[in-house]
Image (tube, helix red, strand yellow):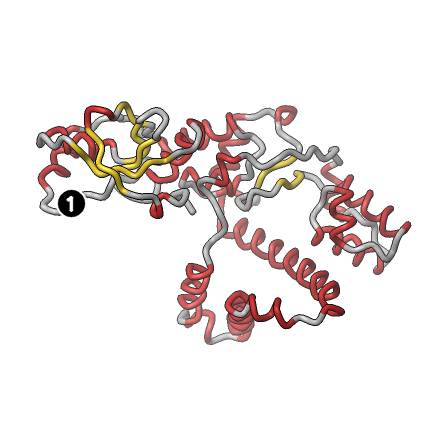
Amino acid sequence: MRDGGLNDSPVELVSTEELTASYSPRTEKKDTEYARKLADLAVPLPPIVVHRQTMKVIDGFHRLLAARLIGVERIAVRFFDGSDENASLLAVALNTTHGRPLTLAERTAAAERILARHPQWSDRAVATVAGLSPGKVSQVRRSEQQETDRPESRVGRDGRVRPLSTSQGRKRASELLRANPQATLRQVASMTGISAATVADVRNRMRRGLPPVPPRQQEKGTKKLTMSPAPAAHSAVAERTPSPALASLSQVLRKDPSLRFNDAGRTVLRMLEACTVVERERKQIMACMPAHCRELISELMYGYAEICRSIAQELQEGADPSRQTG
């Protein structure tokens, strides 16, 4: 979740005098006129978010200022107990989702700070926190980093580490599969540092008599994979899209006539509906799955997941003009 689970934390009343400067990513830290407008509202304002260790305001500085303007001595607070770095990241994430929207310059500056501290994060991971498109983050990354400074792996939105190039891992996987054809995808993946879906692709390419590394990756050269744990800061503010949200998005698409009234669109809708059913019936599927089918279905799932990931990437790149080349 983008709020780091704060909605589940209790609300406490805290003296306004105990609270200090904000983590705000805004260029203009203080807008007294905006605070006065908040003070004039006749409805209660949401609790502010405060870093417990430092008592700094993460989200809600102008609500605090409004309370002080009208003489309120105690204000509703939800405390965040993470690290100082996590608090800074959470401030960016929260300020991109409500209240006065951050300007493009402020969001870009936030992305620059995140990339400086976490260059291994993927474009989508940074985009989720900073409120930018992945294409814009890619532009920021290119302008801030030289080729030799770029890490060899990145951490995605799900917290998993992925190499920028899987060439070496693919070659190693092909060697292991030749030596032990009975090895499972997970076993080979754990020994090579690539995903099980990539291992499945390597095996399929070998069966078709193709080299384990696709030509487009061979052209980019190879880099040795460096694995590192996903940073805790990222996991506090960005997780996968919740199932109810996915179902809602699917419902919106089902009503879109541009998809409903052509064969390709109906195919997409049927595919998404199948995914919705799988997610909804997940526990029952797992409970009833015969033991002798689990490995085969696991391999199929990994393979199809890789196909879906590839389609998602192509759709994203096609929708982002900054990634298109003429």
**Compared to 195, does 56 lie above or below?**
above
Q: Residue at x 55, y 36 (%)?
A: 121
Q: Residue 81 location, x and y as percent?
A: 39, 34
Give percent across and percent down for residue 185.
76, 54
Above or below for 29 versus 5: above
Q: Is residue 190 left or right of residue 96?
A: right
Task: Identify the residue at image location x=9%, y=45%.
Answer: 42
Q: Which residue is nearer to you in this view: 324 or 300? A: 300
Residue 100, above or below 84: below
The secondary structure type at the circle numbered 1 is loop
- Left/right placement of residue 312 relative to residue 253 reads right
**Camera-side residue: 310 or 114?**
114
Count the marks: how many?
Answer: 1
Give the percent coordinates (x, y) of residue 19: 25, 26
Position of 86 relative to 318 (above/below) = above
- The residue at the point 61 percent across, 59 percent down is 308
Q: Nearer the viewer, residue 169 or 229?
A: 229
| Residue located beneath label 1 in the image | 44
Q: Residues within 10 Å of mark 1 (few under 14, many from 20)?
A: few
Q: Where residue 111 sits in the image (x, y, percent)?
A: 45, 32
- Identify the residue at horizontal 72%, vertical 38% (top origin): 220
Which amino acid does the dot numbered 1 rest on? Pro
Relative horizontal placement of residue 170, taking residue 150 as reference (left or right) = right
User: Residue 258's quadrant in the figure?
Assistant: bottom left
Q: Is residue 243 visible?
A: yes
Q: Is residue 264 visible?
A: no
- Give the quadrant of the C terminus: top right
